[in-house]
Image (cartoon, grey):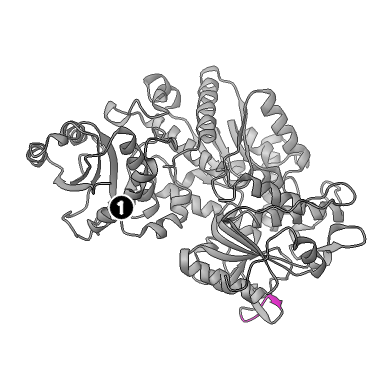
């Protein structure tokens, strides 16, 4: 592949005219360009003033760049970086444009001014060969100050993973298009309705939700001809009719988990058309004075039914919201009922197998939601695995080896997953060392565990929480953005810090809350070794008593979530000897020296 040329041009008519005259490709060839408002932009410059950036592609660079000169939201930009290559074609340029947008959004040093017209992860001739050159183009643009961080740093960041500027898989693209059609049909007819997006861990449910909100925000803002390429998948929604329907639309996203909520707020803060105020708890929605036209609910299975909340203030607020919305404190009302009462339309992202506490919406409610959505043709399944490189078979396998199969569990056939590094450890210290080694290689490698030890270090910072065979660890010292925190490599994360996140390598400690009953031939729960108070609390408000079988379901779900965080690999240490023996034929045990 021939090296690409990168030209820097001042963003003004005089310099664009001079540059266009240098080569016919500047007016008649597929190219990609980056506009920014840095204070200076010469080769090797440090771009400390970078605030706004826009990426585009065109077959007529001069004409397209001149269009931007008269655009109200781009005329303040100062510099043009043009990528020219004799081998480029339209498909390559769309792919490179999408890549640079994603990387700039993940870099976090600027606002990406692009709108979301819809780039699908589409194949083309020699794609892999072209993509090898993208990293070189990235580094040359980084040398000009366009980027501030390296590729691995960006790809490991939440800003990158949760960015609305994603290439969608085919099933995600189908879901987004169908949901847009449903939403705009509802706006036209005044219908109220619920849409369900369902998928296993790693299928990109959160990505779909964030992508949709950005796309709707861009449609609502209106678009000029210079910004909407007819080749983009969702260009048909950028017309006057859809603009009129979307104008004034009040939207938001509900995120039950505190850590993930804060991460999404950071993404929204840096994304034009979105705002951190749009990211809410169910309580925020319940107490809001205004109604919402559309709410996206991430991890809908983690919405609460009526139960003893984490604080007295939240118990009071739950009662007050019920009274405000329904005229009385009806204990049968859930946070899902609040969402439906406060919004005309809802998009619920869910996976019932990720419910991890008794206060979560009960399975029967989730089953009804899915059945109703299917009956109304408002159900969108996601099946492509975006996280775990072992694929969907791995997710299903993890659930099988943990899940019951009748009164007595049957032996699950052992499976392997190619290059995916899935292995069982007999030595917790060695697993910890491997996680440190992997983190030094690729970053984003952490130890996680079930809540099988009390959190002593919460009140005594000098105390250790987990002690296994002479190795001592502390639980996560922060509940927000723990994975990126300074101490995370020395600590162990709980389900509440990692659900919804990716890791490159996850070292999962299966604690004494699960064991294997060799006489019965099945996995059983040890209630006394499970220390999440809210994870095993009976519900006196609804008269519900949670049995050991109920608790077993929640704890299995927790470990299934933990075991599906790792992109490149998952390491497992099991405390109970009998459970370790049961899992030994099912999880590869590799050489200590690997």
Q: Quadrant of residue 527?
A: bottom right
Percent x, y of residue 369: 70, 33
Most distant residue in the top direction = 189
Specify the segment rendered in magenta: 462-468
Q: Residue at x 83, y 51 (%)?
A: 550
Q: Residue at x 35, y 60 (%)?
A: 150
Percent x, y of residue 208: 52, 39
Q: Residue at x 41, y 49 (%)?
A: 269
Query: Is 376 drawn above or below residue 369 in the view shown?
Result: above
Percent x, y of residue 21: 7, 36
Side of 551 where 501 appears, left or right = left
Percent x, y of residue 379: 63, 29
Most distant residue in the right direction = 519
Side of 317 where 103 appears, left or right = left
- In the rendered structure, does residue 255 fall within the stretch colored magenta? no
Residue to which mark 1 is pinned: 138
Q: The residue tagged with tag 1: helix, strand or loop? A: helix
Confirm whether residue 540 shows in the render.
yes
Q: Residue at x 81, y 55 (%)?
A: 551
């Amino acid at each position: 592949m021939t090296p690409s040329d990168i030209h820097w041009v001042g963003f003004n008519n005089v310099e664009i005219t001079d540059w266009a005259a240098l080569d016919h490709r500047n007016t008649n060839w597929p190219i990609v360009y980056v506009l920014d408002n840095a204070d200076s932009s010469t080769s090797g410059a440090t771009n400390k003033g970078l605030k706004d950036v826009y990426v585009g592609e065109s077959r007529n660079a001069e004409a397209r760049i001149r269009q931007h000169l008269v655009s109200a939201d781009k005329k303040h930009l100062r510099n043009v970086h043009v990528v020219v290559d004799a081998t480029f074609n339209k498909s390559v340029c769309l792919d490179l444009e999408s890549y640079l947008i994603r990387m700039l959004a993940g870099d976090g040093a600027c606002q990406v001014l692009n709108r979301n017209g819809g780039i699908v992860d589409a194949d083309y001739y020699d794609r892999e060969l072209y993509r090898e050159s993208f990293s070189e183009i990235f580094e040359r643009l980084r040398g000009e100050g366009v980027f501030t961080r390296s590729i691995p740093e960006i790809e490991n960041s939440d800003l990158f993973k949760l960015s609305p500027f994603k290439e969608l898989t085919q099933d995600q693209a189908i879901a987004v298009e169908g949901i847009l059609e449903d939403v705009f049909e509802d706006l036209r007819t005044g219908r109220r309705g619920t849409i369900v997006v369902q998928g296993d861990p790693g299928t990109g449910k959160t990505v779909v939700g964030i992508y949709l909100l950005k796309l709707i925000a861009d449609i609502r803002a209106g678009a000029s001809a210079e910004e909407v390429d007819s080749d983009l998948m969702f260009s048909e929604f950028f017309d006057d009719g859809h603009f009129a329907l979307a104008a004034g639309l009040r939207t938001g996203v509900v995120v039950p988990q505190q850590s993930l909520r804060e991460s999404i707020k950071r993404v929204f803060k840096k994304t034009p058309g979105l705002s951190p105020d749009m990211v809410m708890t169910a309580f925020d929605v319940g107490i809001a004075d205004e109604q919402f036209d559309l709410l996206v609910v991430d991890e809908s299975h983690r919405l609460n039914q009526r139960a003893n909340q984490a604080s007295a203030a939240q118990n009071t607020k739950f009662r007050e919201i019920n009274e405000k919305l329904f005229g009385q404190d009806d204990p049968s009302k859930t946070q899902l009922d609040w969402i439906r009462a406060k919004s005309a339309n809802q998009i619920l992202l869910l996976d019932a197998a990720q419910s991890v506490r008794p206060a979560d919406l009960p399975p029967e409610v989730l089953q009804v939601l899915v059945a109703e959505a299917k009956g109304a043709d408002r159900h969108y399944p996601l099946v492509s695995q975006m996280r775990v490189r072992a694929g969907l078979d791995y997710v299903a396998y993890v659930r099988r080896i943990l899940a019951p199969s009748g009164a007595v569990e049957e032996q699950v056939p052992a499976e392997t997953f190619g290059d995916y590094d899935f292995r069982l450890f007999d030595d917790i210290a060695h697993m910890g060392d491997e996680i440190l080694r992997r983190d030094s290689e690729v970053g984003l490698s952490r130890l996680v565990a079930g809540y099988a030890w009390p959190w002593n270090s919460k009140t005594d910072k000098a105390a250790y929480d987990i002690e296994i065979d002479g190795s001592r660890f502390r639980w996560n010292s922060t509940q927000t953005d723990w994975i990126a925190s300074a101490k995370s490599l020395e600590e162990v994360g709980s389900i509440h810090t990692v659900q919804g996140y990716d890791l490159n390598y996850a070292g999962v400690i299966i604690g004494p809350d699960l064991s294997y009953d060799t006489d019965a031939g099945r996995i059983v729960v040890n209630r006394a070794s499970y220390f999440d108070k809210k994870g095993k609390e009976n519900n006196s408000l609804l008269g519900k008593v949670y049995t050991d079988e109920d608790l077993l379901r929640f704890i299995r779900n927790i470990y299934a979530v933990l075991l599906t965080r790792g992109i490149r690999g998952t390491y497992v240490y099991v405390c109970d000897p009998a459970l370790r023996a049961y899992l030994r034929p099912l999880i590869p045990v590799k050489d200590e020296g690997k």
